[in-house]
Amino acid sequence: MIRLEQVSKRYPDGTVAVDDLTLTAPTGKITVLVGPSGCGKTTSLRMINRMIEPTSGRILIDDQDTASRDANALRSGIGYVIQHAGLFPHRTIEHNVATVPLLLGWHKRKARERAREMLAVVGLDESMARRYPSQLSGGQQQRVGVARALAADPPVMLMDEPFSAVDPVVREQLQDEFLRLQAELGKTIVFVTHDIDEAIRLGDQVAVLRVGGKLAQVAEPAYLLAHPADDFVADFVGKDRGYRALGFVDGQVRVHDEPTVRLGASADEARAVTRDPWLLVVDEARMPQGWVEPERLTAPIEAATLALGGTLARQGGPLRNALDSALSSPSRRGVVVDDDGRLVGTVRAAEVLQQIEAADRPEQRDDDGAAALLEQTGELPVVTGPPPAASEPRRDP
Amino acid sequence: MIASVIDWLTDPAHWSGTDGIPSRIVEHLWASLLVVAIAAAIAIPLGVWVGHTGRGKWLVSAANALRAIPSLGLLFAVALWLGPRISNADIAFLLPAVIVLVILAIPPLLSGAYAGVEAVDPAARDAARGMGMSPMRVLREVELPCALPLILSGLRSATLQVVATWTIAAVLGVGGLGRYLLDGLASADYPQTAAGALLVAALAVLVDLVLAGVERGAVSPGLTDPTRAGKKPRREPVATTDPAGAPIGASASTQGREAS
């Protein structure tokens, strides 16, 4: 557990980077600091490993005051990942990853074995080990950065906009893997980003900071979206927050049976199945492939002629995905699959909306009370209604 | 003319004795090595310190201004001022020559070391510190290895200049290949002068090749990878001209001619 107690950072020229910040990052959870530029989020992060010394206040890691420890020893016990990865260009990937173990005096061979293990953990091929950072893509470099931070198995990780310098597709992939990794490793993570979507996607708890280094609100993502504390937070979390909040609402929507046809079926076979203008095509494993219009078919169904574009919703997953699959489907029937990606049936947008109306919003609660609770127990306050961080991983199927 | 130069160079009498070509080359190399070693011992730590701390950048500009001083003029000035104060006759002439050439060698070494350390990726430096490296360790394990290409490039530039310019130190009576040029001129033995100039040029090229080999061996492949070649200035970034008006790092033969 990391606790910041009334931490401030003032510079000699009078600038206040962080103003009286009190915050707890619970053990084994991801706490995201988010805010516009100049809100002091990076400064707050860097004060935790004493890259920046606070002007006043205390920072405790597992109840030990960081100021009482040797700064270098403190830092080598904390994983540190930064925006541009900051790999050492003159060292091989393997040597980069082994940095902290070597710093801690591990034997060379052991450190190298550990580095290879870590590369596998972050999904990099062993052939990368002997390469140099300049030979890797931005996304790969960032994976190496994460591997390097994890190499000595630190209980605490600080991550400063680690995914913001890579393109959106790679970023999403890295975020997914980061969540998968965290589900296994359960590190205590403080994560800085300026991207509210990323904050909501990754955070177990999100702290919104405003310019001047003041804490605006700390809450779980679902609660933050439903109950922004003030106009600033409301503005910052964005206009489509209502829709995004559905990503945290799980619900059972009625699933209808959907007539299907196999890939390769003839036009007549397709027309025999349904009278509906749209027909769903599946493969041998009953994985949805796309939609066809039987009336327009002139040849057997091929993968290349399918109408695509519909998203898939996972059974029992968030309502946002169910609604999105219905809205994006050419037939307006959202395709629902099971955990293995096999077809379960389809949902209708209207029924998803009914479900949404029936679902509870995260209940209104006094924010100071929540902060006080955090301060006392260091635990996330319990929110009635569907728990946002419930067993379902928050990712698109 | 060419034939007489070849005759001079191939004359066995010129390849032995204390004024023979091998011993002159050894003298020349020793003197150059001494000068570069002294200059490097001063300039590299200083440049690294400036690059590391970001303080004292004026030192680099000041050193570059030194390049405007004509070396021959300085050579006489220092010899006239220092010579009478030293009783040992050998040192009385050697020391001024060494001092002047050290002054000449400092600017490229200093700018190379400074530019090299300053150009280290701030993210790499930040990461090194954030992982718990002490400042000395950051310097040793990250900044110096990353700065090595530019440090060595400064070293090559300085060495080339010293090897070429030690020739003119012969006016003070010190040894080296410059002897052939001056003695040849004094006795109107032009084949000797031309042969001396050729030898200086050849020596400079050879030394540069050796240093290029050292550079290739010492610098991490991660820093010289072709995919990065365009991103990092491989040569000394400070554009200045030397007293003769030739760009710094000009070919050895240009500088050899300056001396002849």
Image (cartoon, coloured by chain):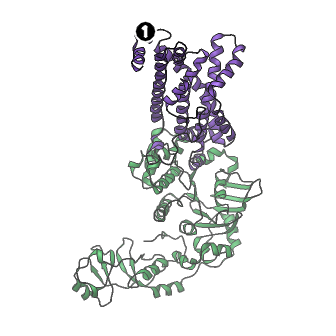
Chain colours: A green, B purple
Foreground of the two, A113 or B78: B78
Which amino acid, by three-letter code, is at mark 1? Answer: Ala
Determine the residue positioned at 29% across, 74% down.
A304
Residue A299 sits in quarter: bottom left
Foreground of the two, A278 or B238: B238
| Quarter of the image that includes the C terminus of chain A | bottom left
Q: Is residue A371 above or below residue B134?
A: below
Q: Position of residue B178 (x, y in %)?
A: 54, 19
The total of numbered circles placed on residues is: 1
> At numbered mark 1, what does the secondary structure look like: helix, strand or loop?
helix
Q: Is residue B122 above or below residue B179?
A: below
Residue B17 visible: yes
Q: Is residue B18 above or below residue B70?
A: above
Determine the residue positioned at 45% across, 46% down.
A132
Q: Position of residue A230 (x, y in %)?
A: 68, 75
Tell me the crowding category of disc 1: few under 14, some 14 to 19, or many 20 or more residues within 10 angstroms, Cα based.
few
Residue B165 sits in quarter: top right
Q: Is residue B256 above or below residue A51?
A: above
Foreground of the two, B200 or A353: B200
Residue identified by numbered label 1: B13
Q: Position of residue A154 (x, y in %)?
A: 55, 51
Foreground of the two, B27 or B76: B76
Taking the view exactly as shown, the residue that stands out farthest to the bottom is A275
Please report, as a chain letter, where disc 1 is located: B
In this rendering, would A185 be left or right of B80? left
| Quarter of the image that includes the N terminus of chain A | bottom right
